Every structure is written in structure tokens, then in C-alpha cells.
Image (tube, helix red, strand yellow):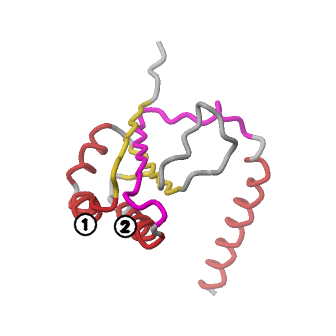
Amino acid sequence: MKNRRSFFKKSLSGLALASLLPLSKYSRATEVKLSGTLIHHVFFWLKEPENEAHKKQLITALNQLIKVKTIKLSHIGLPAGTEARDVVDHSYSVSYMAMFDNKNDQAAYQTDPIHLQFVAENEYLWRKVVVYDSTDIVES
């Protein structure tokens, strides 16, 4: 009986969540506030950009890196292939974004053994790395 109740509760929760999904496409970006967060966006240029094994190794390593406990949200990506414009840079090989609750969590990430191991084992793959860190605007 307990398993049946548990199943029923989980099913109802899933249905409730699923019913909200169609509404999410109508949400406006201004409705989402990321107060106090720090976004750490890293772009990697591989030494051998055509070397698929190196790209795969970097992506695999990034998937291990996101296990750092202070990371709240992450994204690993490739150039999107959007239209070529003067302001769009498609020249990087792989991008990585991590979101932290605050600057202290990002600082802890920098010295986390997982991060240090990531750099030590993979830095030979890239010729250039650019990091953009941003935090939210404090409104007065």
C-alpha cells in the first residue's frame, strides 16, 4: 500500500510539473532574477581544432569538472553556427559556463582539487583560454 501511495504522489507531482512546461515558453527573461550569482564563462581554443579526439577529451574532462560542489548550474557547448556578424566570435573550440551562488563559491572552485586536476591534465590541449566572469547589477 505504501509503494502504491508513493507511486501515486510521484505521478501527481510529475503531472503537475509537466503541466507548467507549456507556460515556460511564455515566460519573459526579466521574470528570472539571478540575485547574487556569479557566472563564469570560459572559452577554449584548442591547439589542434580539427582533432576530434582532443575535443572529445576536453568535453569529457569538463563533464568531470562540473562535479565541483559549489557549481549550481553549468553548460558545455560548441560554436552555435549562427549567422556571421562582426560582433559574433565563432573561432573558439569549446565553451564552458558555470554559475555560482556568490564570489566565495567561485573562489572555492578555483582551488578545488577537481578543478586543479582538470587544468593539470588538460592544459596541453589548448592554445588560448578566455574567461568572462560576471555578476548581477546591484539596483539602487
Residue located 48% across and 70% down the image: 52
Residue labelled with disc 2: 61
Residue labelled with disc 1: 121
Residue located 22% across and 56% down the image: 112
The crowding category of the residue bearing disc 1, from other C-alpha atoms within 10 Å (few below 14, some 14 to 19, many at least 20), is: few
**Compared to 24, does 87 lie above or below?**
above
Q: Helix, strand, or loop for circle 1?
A: helix
Q: Helix, strand, or loop for circle 2?
A: helix
Residue located 41% across and 70% down the image: 60
Question: Where is residue 90 shown, x and y percent of the image?
Answer: 56, 46
Question: Which of 48 and 66 lies nearest the eye of the viewer?
Answer: 48
The crowding category of the residue bearing disc 2, from other C-alpha atoms within 10 Å (few below 14, some 14 to 19, many at least 20), is: some
Q: Is residue 41 magenta?
A: yes
Q: Label 2 amino acid?
A: Ala
Question: Where is residue 123 shown, x and y percent of the image?
Answer: 27, 59
Q: Label 1 amino acid?
A: Glu
Q: Are marks 2 and 1 in contact (CB under 8 Å)?
A: yes
Task: Give the mark nearer the N terminus: 2 vs 1.
Answer: 2
Q: Quadrant of residue 125?
A: bottom left
Q: In which quadrant of the rendered image does the N terminus lie?
A: bottom right
Read off the magenta span.
Answer: 27-50
